[in-house]
Image: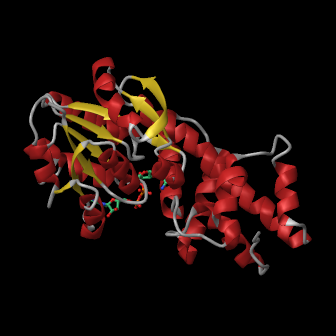
Amino acid sequence: MAEKIGFIGLGAMGGPMAANLARKGSDLIVYDIDSAKVQTLVDLGATPAGSVAEIAKAADIILTMLPDSPEVEEAVLGPDGILAHGRPDQLVMDMSTIAPSTTDRLLKTLNEAGIGFVDAPVGRLVTHAIAGELLFMVGASGNDFGRVKPLIEGMGTTIHHCGAPGTGIRTKLVNNLIAISVCQIDAEAITLAQAFGLDVQNTIDVINGTTAMNGHLITNWPNKVLKGDTSPGFRVALAHKDVSLALQAAHEAGIPMFTGASVREAYASARAAGYGDQDFSSLVDFLCEKAGIEPPRL
Ligand code: NAD
């Protein structure tokens, strides 16, 4: 009999990811603190759950796609959580971007109770989540990887088995330190282009023809901020969280991060100025606002 899949966290990413599993025939039970998000999945055939405990009792494999470490920790270790209400031979796959130290703690605690744990954070954007074209960075034992692979294939097109549990989340932080920093330097450069009065499309065409090229200006910005759409997408608050997680991990490893530290503060200022729930491409709007010039639009 097919395994029953629990899905916790149906936001900008988790919603479309769960929807893809539902459409591809997974036997799905879903939970989010926002009941409207649960209803969207029920409309696609999923069973609603009223709590994490209900998911823990019903499902064989439990997927989490939550904002940050405290939410994942609560879902797994809290009184209403998976550890308290689950059973041996279940498997938890966390796809959120959280602190590696939290991942390590969840792995150890769940394994002691006979419950498996896989970290499988994702790369790419909400558009890829909708299209089922995400990239997964998976930390898992060989057996657990085999068990989750069909599910991952239902949500993504590119799978990297990075190694043992804990390697997926670490790979994700390395990747996001770059992605989030490059978005900030793009914002600074395009704000300068605006101040020069340059043609935005021409400037981006030049950038994308040299080693300055990057995914933000090729994929995300033309579909988001440059069209005047700054709805998330990937929220500034989550990008700030990710770069903070990378810096904390670097601090623990004794590695200085000159650029990362200033990038973190750039995101902190955008967040403090009210951009926290906007797409991270809106950093350019924030800088243009500070500079008193028109934001770039195509
Ligand atoms: P989101 O804020 O849109 O969604 C989070 C969802 O979790 C919301 O629906 C919220 O109601 C729900 N939630 C919060 N606390 C809960 C709890 N205690 N129990 C149940 N549900 C709870 O965030 P998102 O953009 O979907 O991101 C989710 C994770 O994926 C984050 O760790 C983020 O860093 C990562 N990520 C996001 C993107 C992106 O482009 N948005 C890309 C890659 C990775």
| 79 to the left or right of 195 | left
Indicate whether 207 appears above or below 162. below
Q: What is the residue that sits farthest to the bottom in this orientation?
A: 292
Residue sitting at x 33%, y 42%: 24
Residue closer to the observer: 129 or 196 = 129
Q: How many marks?
A: 0
Q: Quadrant of ligand 1?
A: bottom left
Residue sitting at x 16%, y 36%: 60
| 150 to the left or right of 191 | left
Q: Quadrant of residue 149?
A: top left
- Colour convention of the picture: secondary structure
Q: What is the residue that sits farthest to the top in this orientation?
A: 142
Q: Quadrant of the C terminus?
A: bottom right
Q: Quadrant of the N terminus?
A: top left
Indicate whether 194 appears above or below 165. below
Whether residue 84 can be seen here: no
Residue sitting at x 55%, y 37%: 174
Residue closer to the observer: 87 or 237 = 87
- Residue 52 point in image, percent of width and height: 17, 53
- Residue 185 point in image, percent of width and height: 73, 55
Residue sitting at x 47%, y 47%: 245
| 244 to the left or right of 55 | right
Residue closer to the observer: 244 or 39 = 39
- Residue 8 point in image, percent of width and height: 26, 52
Indicate whether 194 appears above or below 52. below
Whether residue 279 can be seen here: yes
| 14 to the left or right of 293 | left
Indicate whether 254 appears above or below 50. above
- Residue 284 point in image, percent of width and height: 70, 67
